[in-house]
Image (cartoon, grey):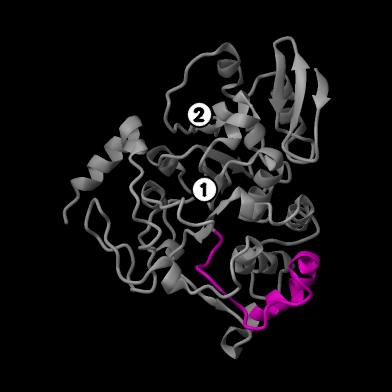
Amino acid sequence: SQPISGGSGGGISVKGGGGARHLWCTDALCAKAAVAAERAGELPYQSDVAAGRPGRGYVYWNKTDFSEELFSRAMWEGPAAVESIDLAVVTTTYKNPPRNALDFINVQPFPTFVSTKEPGLGIHSEPWGNVGQEIPTYTRFILMFWDHLPERMAFLHGHDRAWHQEAYNMHYTLRNLCYKKYEYASLNAFHPVKGPNPKYKPYWKIVTSNWKLVAPWLGKNPPKGGFMDKCCAQFVVTRERVKKRPKAFYEMVLATMTDPKKNYMRAADGKNWGWDLIHFWEAIWHFIFGEPAWVNVEKKYGKGIQKNIYTGAPLSRLPDRSLRNLVKCPQTQCEAKSPMCRESIECMKKQPR
């Protein structure tokens, strides 16, 4: 294949026997075997799209090769198809089978890209392995699709349930997400303060001691009052907000979080620099993407205990851990098109109230 156009991000276009096609993998973002397989047209759904074979028409994540049909087909159809996705889910995982089950992908409505720490899974494998938690996954996606990002992206950890979501299980949140209402919104229910108050001193020290990394883009010093938003680095954001920062910013984040000299394992504050950096990025994602440092979470996300529309069960234990302004827009395309989604909803409706 002969390159005919390229750029700083978002892959290259090549000419082959079947005409021009777009490639997304680069040596920096994919393993060499994945780069070769993509060029040979051997990755999942490449040959189906090239041959014009129709797909299912709904979300289908494959446990064997980690591909999701809607997003994969958009990739191989080309940049315009990726750009036209109104919301793409981007999720991280590790181990095979995944440490946390990813079955929730198949009972939510949005095209999904899975990025795994495990080798041997083509374009889905991160070449640096299991480091940096979700942060390399998020920045890898942004850089891989830089010139052709979807309209909006939901960046997720790779689990349906977590303490910081309360009972807003991710498949439920995505099925009822008012994603067009916000340019940026957290998908977590819990909100901590990260500021200079003595109560939060260890966390604030992590922010101030690492601020030099972002100072060229976010200002010489962090905001004096600290940061407040829903916690824990799961969020939906528009491509315009992502591009508020230049590509070099995300390259810096990726390099910082895939450094083989750092220890990213869980540890007490201040013991492992890599682990501290995970907390650092978690504290400031909303600020990176153009939100005020201190978000009025009750005004933005709502207050009060919301109930599951299918079961009637409460979605949080406390009124201030609410997403009632964000999670109230049923996305009916899921149940309309996907038999797995319909089955999931019917199962929930039968649960005792």
| In front of the other: 264 or 187 | 187
Q: Residue at x 41, y 43 (%)?
A: 104
Residue 152 point in image, percent of width and height: 55, 47
Q: Going by the picture, which residue comes out furthest to the top?
A: 17
User: Three-letter amino acid code at disc 2?
Assistant: Glu
Quadrant location of residue 79? Answer: top right
Determine the secondary structure under disc 2.
helix
Determine the secondary structure under disc 1.
loop
Taking 78 as reference, is 229 left or right?
left
* Rendered position, 91 above or below 37: below
User: Could you tell me if residue 266 is visible in this image?
Assistant: no
Q: Say which mark, if any, is on residue 138.
A: none
Taking 187 as reference, is 261 left or right?
right
Residue 103 point in image, percent of width and height: 42, 41
Q: Residue at x 64, y 81 (%)?
A: 202
In the picture, the quarter occupied by the N terminus is: top right
| 265 in magenta | no
User: Three-letter amino acid code at disc 1?
Assistant: Arg
| 219 in magenta | yes
- Which residue is denoted by mark 1 in the rendering? 99
Residue 117 point in image, percent of width and height: 64, 45
Q: Residue at x 79, y 75 (%)?
A: 220
Density class for disc 1 (Cα within 10 Å; few <14, some 14-19, many ≥20) is few
In the picture, the quarter occupied by the C terminus is: bottom left
Q: Going by the picture, which residue comes out furthest to the bottom?
A: 198
* Magenta region, residue range: 204-233
- Which residue is denoted by mark 2 in the rendering? 69
